[in-house]
Image (cartoon, rainbow, N blue to C red):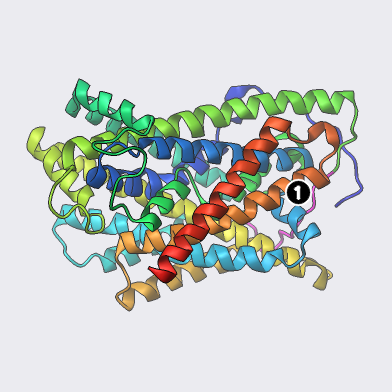
Amino acid sequence: MSTEYKPFPPPLPFKKIIGPSFIILALGLGSGEVILWPYLASNYGLGIAWAAILGITFQFFINMEIERYALVRGESVFVGIARMFPRSVYWFILSTFIGFGLPGIVAASAKVFASIIGVEDFRLIAIIMLLCIGVILSTGKTLYGVMERITKTILLISVPFIFLLALYLSTTSDWVTLFHGTVGRGDGYWFIPPGIGLATFLAAFAYSGAGGNLNLTQSVYIKEKGYGMGKYSQKIQGLFHDKGKQRVQLNGILCEVNDESIAHFSGWWKTINKEHGFVFLLIGSLSMMLLMILSYVTAFGLEGNAQGIQFVINEGLVIGGLIGPFIGTLFLLAVSVMLFQTQLGVMDSTSRIMSENLAIKHINRFPDGVRLSKLYYGFLWSQIAFGILLFLFNIHEPKTLIVAGAVINAVAMFVHTGLVAMLNARELPKPFRPSVFRKCMIGFIFLFFGFFSAVVLIDTLFY
């Protein structure tokens, strides 16, 4: 940690800090919101809606503790955790690549798009999409600016469109059923429907939002946005804009603990809670409920729902039959674009995670430093190459890839929730540490993911 001290910047107005939560929300659209929860609703009804809301609420508290550290230290949580546990960098690189290297989301996007144009084998489309992601992320001036513009545009168009579809197609009784589901009451069951796969349920729960190590990139995004002490941090430049000159600056800058710093922190903390609560928790919950009720009113009980993401295609066919073929096609196109954007965000976030952790490990070995942007693009194109390789070897079923990755990411959430809680308790000055209520919430979430992950592991290995 740098011994340089700078003033804790005063909080910015609410409208000027909106952005990072759009990115973290968009990361979940292609996994939990668009695929897994609507999949469960189409097969088991709306009685599982409570778990979707609980899952995204858990992630709200997890994300805020991640933001807390970056707000005060002006550096990512990876830097702080590596000071406590130097070998943690290996865990974050390995668990991130395994958890998100499986290209299930882009496979789902390609399969939905292929259904629109009448192509059965969607692997070539998926490969083209992966290459497009690489080009998009390689040509922006700064990566954060690229991601914020894309995610805001897609969310502000797709969510209202789905909202209107859900309102038009649903009835009052459907909304009553959804309300019952938010308190755990299903059709003939309470909370957990009989016959549901534990792995799929945990996967959906873990992806009620971003999931896995992706939550940790919230500290990177708010640092680049300039929240709090992140005002003094480095921004990652685009591949064709850094001209080989950008060097890693990982350590944050300390602030003096005085009345002014505490007051500014308090103002920031209130504002970023509002920003994340509105964008991530409120819009995220609304998006999940709308996608679930739309899936329920269009595809519930239809043949083929249990087979991968066939339920999405069933939704499009039913919407086309009820409103018109054009609207059905437009729905499928919107889903495909949302999934593509999610894969774009996932690859950006995972490349950030792995490049920063590799830089943390090796930065002291090179007198002139390490080029963070070069590491970033190395990991980005390695993931793209890995995804293409899987498609060429015919490993391409979207739901299977998504569920497998999500179960791994649930375990990763268990690990990083405990590590961030420990980091904030040890490294932050007392006035900036979490309250007793926040500590209790994080402790409960930590135990929940640990227990659930163990149950799924035992169920997978022995039954």
Q: Neighbour class for label 1 at 10 Å: few (<14), some, many (≥20)?
A: many
Going 56% across and 37% down the picture, which residue do you hit?
60
- The answer to whether residue 18 is left or right of residue 428 is left
Q: Is residue 242 above or below residue 336?
A: below
Q: What residue range appears in magenta?
A: 238-253
- The answer to whether residue 158 is left or right of residue 234 is left
- The answer to whether residue 385 is left or right of residue 397 is right
Residue 336 seen by the camera? yes
Question: Between 100 and 440, which is closer to the camera in this rendering?
Answer: 440
Secondary element at tag 1: helix
Q: Main secondary structure of the magenta part?
A: loop
The type of residue carrying mark 1 is Leu
Going 48% across and 58% down the picture, which residue do you hit?
455
Question: How many labels were placed on the picture?
Answer: 1
Question: Between 408 and 294, which is closer to the camera in this rendering?
Answer: 408
- x then y, percent, for residue 301: 15, 45
Residue occupying the far bottom of the picture: 393
Q: Is residue 191 above or below residue 114?
A: above
**Magenta segment includes 248:** yes
**Magenta segment includes 112:** no
Going 51% across and 42% down the picture, which residue do you hit?
23
| Residue placed under numbered mark 1 in the picture | 423
Going 36% across and 36% down the picture, which residue do you hit?
49
- x then y, percent, for residue 316: 17, 44
Q: Is residue 160 above or below residue 299?
A: above
Residue 137 seen by the camera? no
Instruction: Name the image quarter holding the C terminus.
Output: bottom left
